[in-house]
Amino acid sequence: MCEMNQFELIEEMSLEKKLEILSDAAKYDVACTSSGVDRKGKEGYLGNSVAAGVCHTFAADGRCVSLLKILMTNHCVYDCKYCKNRKSNDVERATFSPEEICKLTIEFYKRNYIEGLFLSSGVIKNPNYTMEKMCEALRMLREEYKFNGYIHVKTIPGASEELIYSAGLLADRISINMELPTQQSLQKLAPNKTMTNIIKPMNQISGTIAAHRLAIGKSARMERAGINNHLVHSIWGEKQDRIEGSNESYDSIKNSLMVGKNSFMYPADNRDLKLKRPFAPAGQSTQMIIGATDETDLELIRTTQSLYQSFDLKRVFYSGYIPLNEDDNLPQIGTPVPLLREHRLYQADWLLRYYGFYANELLDEKMPYFDNRIDPKCNWALKNLDIFPVEVNTASYDVLLRVPGIGPTGVKKIMSARRYSKLNFQMLKKMGIVLKRAQYFITCNGHMMYSFPIEQRFIRNRLIDVDSVDCMKIEGKDMQYKQLNLLTDFGLGVN
């Protein structure tokens, strides 16, 4: 019975019932944004993928619901302790056939309910068998149904290189969930998974994406060559060299991730003659669960930094653990979901990718967790008050970028406007600078916005007041968090 082929069984279950089960089972996977691909409509094909991919709609907990987000099946041979669909759980099971996945995607798309597909799955029999069925569904969708819209596929760790390569040719974004940041945590909660089975295909995907970019005349990392790769100002440049060069923990994490660097699965030319498509044009991403194990925020963002630097990931997603299973190694059922912690990690992630920060600047061994009362950028600024205030009319680009309340767009506006006139606070306000934060760290023409002491405790209390309302909303105990259901929340049916 363990060798049962779920796809050959004739289940007495309607397509609508399967959708109810498998869309609900997919809600714990948050890695489904769709930025990074720009593909116009094509004659004879259905759909397109414009800049930023799919127009997003979010549920109350911030999870994207604009894609048809489903599992191919919630049957699973693995017994990951944190997972609702683990084999030891007594839950209602269902399986989509490749034809049913295609039918649902096309019918929902034609009704303008969704603009793309996010497909993941439990593991049936073994990773290769599961991945083969997923590729079969995607190939049918692309070739037979001529679907030209956005597809994000979650690959199965342990699947063969050939199947992952096929998935990358069929999908726009491809991802492998890391789930937990260390091998020790995986052994504790997911004994069927290993870090090698996760990291090796990540590296192969990264190398193959780079090879395909080079084949069309782009640098392997051109799309990721943002400001975070070169922003090291003299004020803290020496400090960064010291931080990055001396931290043994950071180096060990980074080295453990460097498996077969610069390898790729196939040459840059497309071996599939029927599919003239680039390999994963929207890149790859991954997800880490927050709060199921005892890793600190410092460990999480160090791992995140290594992933970005080593594998050119588009995104690392964080998912606050929702207690679902009774287990001594997990938080007890009823434990609050760490939504505010998840929020701070996303803010830190943004600083790593777009603001030129390093993990060890934001946290250290003495302070390994983010302060929930204040955002990471403000917290960094308070620890480095000797740099502030800075003069907006003369400060360099990278210095202004580190001022709380000023982002990349704001810095560009400041740099452009100050060529023609001296800036004042009223002008900064019109540019969209968040002065309720920035006012404590900048001067205009040598003057601060108001007269107040440049003292850590005073500024910190003011900034906590600024963030308090948002923090209360994120932590709201009376809010009910759930993924919107296409069948019930919108009154839709499946034909």
Image: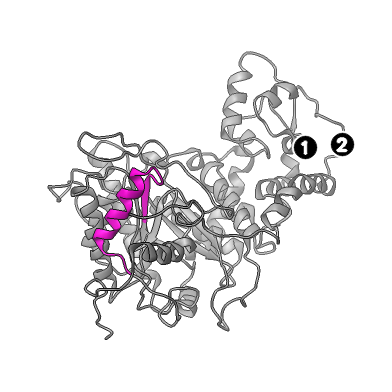
Disc 2 is placed on an element classified as loop
Q: How is the image coloured?
A: one colour
| Position in image of residue 119 (x %, y %) | 35, 58
Residue 338 in view (yes/no): yes
Q: Which residue is mark 2?
A: 452
Which amino acid lies under the numbered mark 2 shown in the image of this protein?
Answer: Phe
CA separation, marks 1 and 2? Answer: 8 Å
Asked where in the image residue 77 lies, by quadrant, the reply is bottom left
| Position in image of residue 236 (x %, y %) | 62, 43
Q: Which residue is mark 1?
A: 440
Q: What number is the disc on residue 415?
A: none
Which corner quadrant holds the N terminus? bottom left
Disc 1 is placed on an element classified as loop
Viewer-side residue, 303 vs 241: 303
Which contiguous range is marked in magenta? 95-118
Compared to 82, does 167 lie above or below? above
Asked where in the image residue 89 lies, by quadrant, the reply is bottom left
Asked where in the image residue 459 lies, by quadrant, the reply is top right
Compared to 300, does 315 lie above or below? above
Viewer-side residue, 54 vs 235: 54
| Position in image of residue 132 (x %, y %) | 23, 65
Q: Kindly give the residue lying farthest to the bottom in the view shown.
A: 1
Which amino acid lies under the numbered mark 1 shown in the image of this protein?
Answer: Tyr
Residue 283 in view (yes/no): no
Tag 1–tag 2 contact (CB < 8 Å): yes
| Position in image of residue 218 (x %, y %) | 30, 37
